[in-house]
Image (cartoon, rainbow, N blue to C red):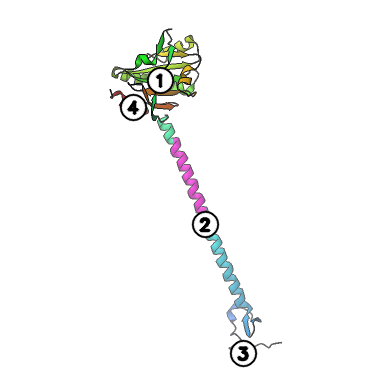
Amino acid sequence: MCECPPSPWLAKDENLTWIQPNFITGPIIWKPVLPGEYITMGKRALMRQKQQQQASQVILAVLGILLFAAGAFSFYVLRTQDQAATQSSSSGSTIPAEVSLPAPSLSLKNINGRTESLLDYRDQVVLVNNWATWCPPCKAEMPTLVSYYQDHLAEGFVIISIEAGESQQQVQEFATQYKMTFPVWLDPDGAAMDAFKNQNLPSSYVIDRSGVIRVMWVGEINRAMLEKYVTPLLAKN
């Protein structure tokens, strides 16, 4: 069994090496670490404390990074949702798609009982609007369509409004209420929706003077979208 060094200063013989004690760290207890080498328990405690501090710092850094990433992601999601909501509320419109499709052959009776065909309007720019009296977005967009039609009627523009399924009387009352002076067709069997291969309401299609569908959309449209996508077609012969 080894003896403690006779003094606090470094002492050495053939078999043992003693380390100068650190009186600041507390009581000096000599304990073998490696053969021929001793260290104080106070120094061992400091080493352990330093390692724990380093581990804590790493954990805190990782947590900080995770919290920052979570906060940034939440901010991005909320900002995206807010922008989408703002855009939706300010525009109140679907965005049309530009296409190039042949217009279908379609003939139906209007609210006056006379049969009409899309071919009857071949020399005009035609906006076909499939709608229903019970459809909220159909009702919401109708004043916009009426206003746009009145402003562009002289430019060779016409709206063919095709109501899906209601009686002649119901459609007539609706047309009178909304001051619809453009042609209104009755479609009790859904022939127009089948012809355009789209069962959604409201749905609209703009046919140019050569009989090609150039623009189409599903949902409520606003005046700005009409001016952007339909008005340029009126200037083409």
Mark-to-mark CA distance, 4 and 2: 51 Å
Q: Amino acid at mark 1?
A: Val
Mark 2 falls on what kind of element?
A: helix
For marks 3 and 2, the one nearer the N-term is: 3
Mark-to-mark CA distance, 3 and 2: 49 Å
Q: Amino acid at mark 3?
A: Ser
For marks 1 and 3, the one nearer the N-term is: 3
Q: Which mark is residue 227?
A: 4
Work out whether residue 122 or residue 42 is closer to the camera in this orientation and state it: 122
For marks 3 and 4, the one nearer the N-term is: 3
Mark 1 or 2, which is nearer the eye?
Answer: 1
Mark 3 or 2, which is nearer the eye?
Answer: 2
Mark 4 falls on what kind of element?
A: helix
Q: Residue at x 36, y 13 (%)?
A: 120
Mark 3 or 4, which is nearer the eye?
Answer: 4
Residue 187: image location, x then y, percent: 47, 14
Mark-to-mark CA distance, 1 and 2: 58 Å
Mark-to-mark CA distance, 1 and 4: 16 Å
The residue that disc 2 covers is 64
Magenta part of the protein: which range? 67-85
The residue that disc 3 covers is 7
Residue 66: image location, x then y, percent: 53, 54
Q: Which mark is residue 150?
A: none
Work out whether residue 195 or residue 7 is closer to the camera in this orientation and state it: 195
Q: Amino acid at mark 2?
A: Gly
